[in-house]
Image (tube, rainbow, N blue to C red):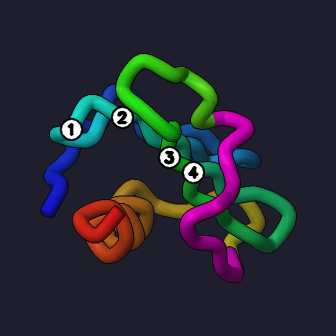
Amino acid sequence: MNTYTIDYIGGMAPTQAEGTLSDGRKFYFRARHGGWSLRVSTSPTNFDYLYSPCIAEGVDKTHGGMSNQSVIEILDQYLPTC
């Protein structure tokens, strides 16, 4: 099970978060235009997380103005299992 650290979280249109999983892989979260996506790099040495396939995505009713707490709830739900 992975834990994670957040290097950055915030913004508005888009709301974004970046960080590192305990196994060294990087993640990228983005919420904009009514949707959000979460991506994780394929390996600790590959920084392709901006272009990796989504591991999760959903609806963002704030259209890019998501609160930090809402982002953390999504990260807590999906990152430990990837």
In this view, the residue in front, 20 or 8, is 20
Mark 1 is surrounded, within 10 Å at the Cα level, by few (under 14), some (14 to 19) or many (20 or more) other residues, namely few
Mark 4 is surrounded, within 10 Å at the Cα level, by few (under 14), some (14 to 19) or many (20 or more) other residues, namely many
Q: Kindly indicate whether the residue at mark 2 contacts the one at mark 1 (C-beta within 8 angstroms).
A: yes
**Does dot 1 land on a helix, a strand or a loop?**
loop
Q: Which amino acid does the dot numbered 3 rest on?
A: Val
Mark 4 vs mark 1: in front: 1
Image quadrant in which you'd find residue 8 = top left
Check disc 1 and report the residue beneath it. 23
> Quarter holding the N terminus?
bottom left
Residue 26 placement (x, y as % from top left): 41, 33
The Cα atoms of the two marked residues, 1 and 2, are separated by 6 Å
Q: Which amino acid does the dot numbered 1 rest on?
A: Asp
Mark 2 is surrounded, within 10 Å at the Cα level, by few (under 14), some (14 to 19) or many (20 or more) other residues, namely many
**Does dot 4 land on a helix, a strand or a loop?**
strand
Q: Which mark is residue 39?
A: 4
In this view, the residue in front, 65 or 32, is 32
> Start and end of the magenta stretch?
50-61
Q: Which amino acid does the dot numbered 4 rest on?
A: Arg
The Cα atoms of the two marked residues, 4 and 1, are separated by 15 Å
Check disc 2 and report the residue beneath it. 25
Q: Earlier in the sequence, mark 4 or mark 1?
A: 1
Q: Kindly indicate whether the residue at mark 3 contacts the one at mark 4 (C-beta within 8 angstroms).
A: yes
The Cα atoms of the two marked residues, 1 and 3, are separated by 11 Å
Check disc 3 and report the residue beneath it. 40
Q: Earlier in the sequence, mark 3 or mark 2?
A: 2
- Residue drawn at x 80%, y 72% is 34
